[in-house]
Amino acid sequence: MQIVSELIEIPNNGAPSTEYIEGELTKRNINPLRWAVVHVSDKMYTVSVANLKE
C-alpha cells in the first residue's frame, strides 16, 4: 500500500460538511487517510488529501 499526497478541487456548495467532502473524494476514487481544506474560494474548496493507493 502506498500513501500519495494530492491537492483536489471540490465545488463550493456553500455548506461544507465532512459528509459532503468525503462523498466528493469517494466519487473520485480517493481513499483518504486524512484530509484538510487548505483554501476556499467562491467556487472551489482546495483539499489536501493523503490518498491510500494499493
Image (tube, grey):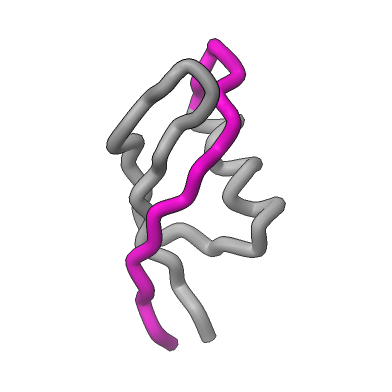
Q: Is residue 5 above or below residue 14?
A: below
Q: Closest to the observer: 29 or 39?
A: 39
Q: Nearer the viewer, residue 33 or 50?
A: 50
Above or below 24: residue 28: below
- Where does residue 33 sit, x and y in percent of width and height? 39, 60
Work out whether residue 19 or residue 28 is closer to the camera in this orientation and state it: 28
Question: In the rendered view, does 49 fall on the left or right side of 24?
Answer: left
| Residue with the most extreme front position | 42
Answer left or right for 7 relative to 15: left
Q: Residue at x 53, y 86 (%)?
A: 54
Q: Is residue 31 above or below residue 52?
A: above
For the point 46% across and 58% down, the residue is 32
Q: Quadrant of residue 38?
A: top left
Q: Which image quadrant is residue 7 in?
A: bottom left
Q: Is residue 32 magenta?
A: no
Give the x, y percent position of residue 30. 57, 62
Inspect the magenta stretch and tell me whether residue 7 lies in it. Answer: yes
Q: What range of the chain is rendered magenta? A: 1-17
Query: Looking at the rendering, in which quadrant would you find the N terminus?
Result: bottom left
Q: Is residue 45 left or right of residue 35?
A: right
Q: Could you tell me which residue is drawn at 39 percent across and 84 percent down? A: 2
Asked whether 29 or 11 is in front, the reply is: 11
Q: Residue furthest right?
A: 27
Specify the farthest residue to the top: 14
Query: How many numbered circles are shown?
Result: 0
Q: Residue at x 55, y 12 (%)?
A: 14
Q: Residue 44: percent from the left, percent from the top?
A: 50, 29
